[in-house]
Image (tube, rainbow, N blue to C red):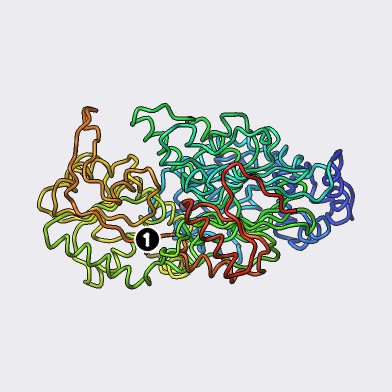
Amino acid sequence: MTSTPKGLQTTNSILGKVMEALATFIPSDVEVTRVQFEGAKIALYARKPEILLIDKPYIVPSVVNSIRKRIVVRSDPSVRRSEADAERLIRSILPKEAGITNIVFDPTLGEVVIEAKNVGLAVGKDGSNLNRIIQETKWIPRVLRSPQISSRTITQVRQVLYSESKERERFLRSLGEAIFRPLTFEGNEVITRFLGGFREVGRSCILVETRESKVMLDCGINPGASRFPEMFPRLDIDELDLSDLDAVVVSHGHLDHCGAIPFLYKYGYDGPIYCSEPTLPIMTLVQLDFLDVMTKNGYIPPYDQKDVRSMIVHTIPIRYGYVVDIAPDIKLTLWNAGHILGSSIVHLHIGEGLFNIVYTGDFKYGKTMLFEPAHASFPRAESLIIESTYGAPKDLMAPRTEVEASFVNIVNSCVEKGGKVLIPTPAIGRAQEILMVVNEYMESGKLEKIPVYIEGMVNEATGIHTAYPEYLSRDIRDKILHENVNPFKSEWFIVVNDASDREEALAPNRPAIIIATSGMMEGGPVIEYFKNLCEDPRNTLLFVSYQVEGTLGRKLKNGLKEVTLPDEYGKMQLYQVKMEVLSIEGFSGHSDRRQLLRYVGGMKPKPRRVVVCHGEESKAINLASTINRMLKIEASSPINLEALRFI
Ligand SMILES: [Zn+2]
């Protein structure tokens, strides 16, 4: 027997359709009490959710099929056991061997998150344990893997989400109303405005406009900017009103792509951020570190922790490959970009088959230890916006085996001299790749077995990697999931947490590898190490990642021999650079010139129009003209503030 849930009414036409479908498909003994938007999903609250979740699991898919919207089933608060009772029951249901490390309740959504060391044992055969939890407690369980290296940032993000869960529910409900609002404007118009990161590396930002909606892709800062206004994208244009921006999509958690996001909240944006699951903790980590570094360098940061918190509350993490409605006429899908953990190629589908944009963000079209190559095939794609960090004809990287061999040589010859190797890395990405290489070559005996000091923030970022094995390359994922091996752990690694650890790392006449942030030497502990090590010619400074123009890293790479830096009392001191300064490009998380061209040429379907971004002026121009000439695809390298009407 079916009937319309009693007392349910709505003026929204989508919710109206859902109600009709419910009346047709859902038996009345489910006792639906509430139906509401939860972002682009529909949440269905019921007194007997177990009927839909366990007894008759085929019902919800048929409703989804008829309304073509995702549905989540939630329990009505009145039927849930108290949190204390529920926790006791859960602990009695799950076997000891599951290794529960944490149980957290989210009363707004009626979910209980169980962190366990062994997810398979916690879930039970065919989900039997989870079903029992639903039946006995009426809380809906979600089991997450406890990270092998615990991450403070992940805990912090979860705490914000739980403590602000009422606010988040309100936000998700109004977001749903906005996404599924009736279309005011029909019409075929797709315009992109380039607000930052064009013919430059840094402050990436693009605005995509249709007559109905506005979506921003990335909003980063320029870490090499010498003047404050040049640090930010051009958010001051008339066409941008933060209050009518529908969504912001973040391709990945590097500062030059996400560093200005909290700034949007400070100035009135209160809409959603879409990104992959690991990107949320990663961007939180790098933004908080950015605030810290700015304050320590005596600057007033452009936003504060409160704005980072607002960003967390408004972020909607999505998995690779899921299609999500983000505006009445725009659908978003994220795909692996192979650049850093959670980095995404952004696919926007506009209108019903009207137009498609692929934005690569930063991407690697080649296999690395950590990631599979970037995704290159899409259901439809008329246009491509592609990075060009290594877009010049000379930007060819040696094969990976050669790159690793030269890394081993550099370290071994420095050790022979009795020196230390200082490697500046961004916390996320290159650091983990280098750790894996170091461990592998030390184990095989090719690399001298010396202590490897890892600064705390790098270790924190590594912890985030172990929490999201699904986003790593197949081999590493298998190590974590099936062999329960932590691939980032090694007997030679020492995590530096305080001044005495740092002293140990700097102890004279003891060869060591030191991995420290920031990657472009714009602050962070790497500066302290550098000041201590730079005047001894036995030491080596080894760059393994891209150095943006204007940064200290870039200047040193270009041969700067004298550096003025503040000493421990803040007094400026002159340092002579006598240490060897070397650079290896092949570990880069970016595609080299060959990979960039191979990506454009091999992308499916072939794009009709290419826009080149994220590269120094000459590289962006050169890559665009090569794409024109060699691949016969219309390509351009616009400058900031230019706009392009696709259709
Ligand atoms: Zn990046």
Q: Nearer the viewer, residue 422 or 190?
A: 190
**Residue 314 seen from this side:** yes
Q: Give neighbour class at mark 1: few <14, some 14-19, many 20+ (Cα, 10 Å).
A: some
Does mark 1's beta carbon lie closer than 8 Å to ligand 1? no
In-image side of 134 versus 404 (left or right): right
- Image x and y of residue 147, in percent: 43, 54
Q: Nearer the viewer, residue 493 or 75?
A: 493
Q: Nearer the viewer, residue 131 or 388?
A: 388
Snapshot quadrant of residue 368? bottom left
Q: Is residue 305 above or below residue 62?
A: above
Determine the residue positioned at 39% across, 67% down.
Answer: 397
In-image side of 314 versus 101 (left or right): right
Q: Nearer the viewer, residue 285 or 644?
A: 644
- Image x and y of residue 565, in percent: 25, 35
- Image x and y of residue 386, in percent: 56, 57
- Image x and y of residue 509, in percent: 9, 52
Q: Amino acid at mark 1?
A: Glu
Look at mark 1 in the image and give the residue it sits on: 433
Secondary structure under tag 1 reads helix
Snapshot quadrant of residue 643? top right
Q: Is residue 10 above or below residue 113?
A: above
- Quarter of the image for the N terminus: give it: bottom right
